[in-house]
Amino acid sequence: MYTHEFKKRVRYGETDQMGYLYYGNYAQYYEIGRVELIRSLGLTYRALESEHGIIMPVMSMNTRYVRPALYDELITIRTTLRKLPDQYIVFHMELFNEAGKLVNGGTVKLCFVEVATQRTIPAPDLLVEKLIPHFEKDRP
């Protein structure tokens, strides 16, 4: 299992009339978590696309709202990979408020597509190789 955390403050423009993080903006927080997890491995989405010709379209997203994230609150975005990617990669998302209370949780499933052929491919070796050490230490 591999987990990464990133902090982001809720901006005024992201909130609704009640001062709550607008429900439609949670997908952007999920994206921040995914991008920063990949970056923490020494890779970037940009490099995957421009240097390796691989894109990762979203196939599905599930979310559950537990309590509101509030304007100016510092949110911890916890992103976890519970299994090594194969044909798909599934990010498990949890957002916590400053008090450490769960605000929101969900999953995002993506596939890997080779830009040149526009066909789905298995998880690229360069990503899997970076993740394997994190999963080996979880084995009994």
Image (cartoon, rainbow, N blue to C red):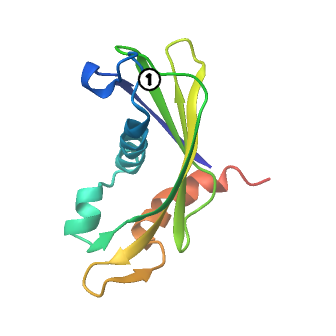
Whole-percent x, y for residue 74 in the image: 40, 18
Q: Residue at x 42, y 81 (%)?
A: 120
The residue that mark 1 highlights is: 75
Q: Which sits in the foreground, 106 or 115?
A: 106
Quarter holding residue 23: top left
Q: Residue at x 42, y 20 (%)?
A: 20
Which residue, as the protein is rendered here, is positioned at the far right?
A: 140
Residue 77 spot, x, y in % from top left:
47, 32
Residue 3, compared with residue 132, is above or below; it is above
Tell me which residue sits at (47%, 72%) in the image: 123
Q: Is 42 on the left or on the right of 81, as rendered?
A: left
Q: Vertically, is 72 above or below 103? A: above
* 107 with respect to 48 (left or right): right
Residue 28 % position (x, y): 36, 42
Q: Amino acid at mark 1?
A: Ile
Instruction: Rate crowding at label 1 as few (under 14), some (14 to 19) or many (20 or more) other CA atoms within 10 Å.
Output: many
- Give 85 or 91, whichever is nearer the viewer: 91
Q: Position of residue 68 (x, y in %)?
A: 51, 22
Label 1 element class: strand
Identify the residue at image location x=70%, y=50%. Answer: 138
Q: Nearer the viewer, residue 126 or 16?
A: 16
The quadrant in which residue 47 appears is bottom left
Using residue 139 as the reference point, say whether residue 119 is left or right of it: left
Give the residue furthest to the front: 17
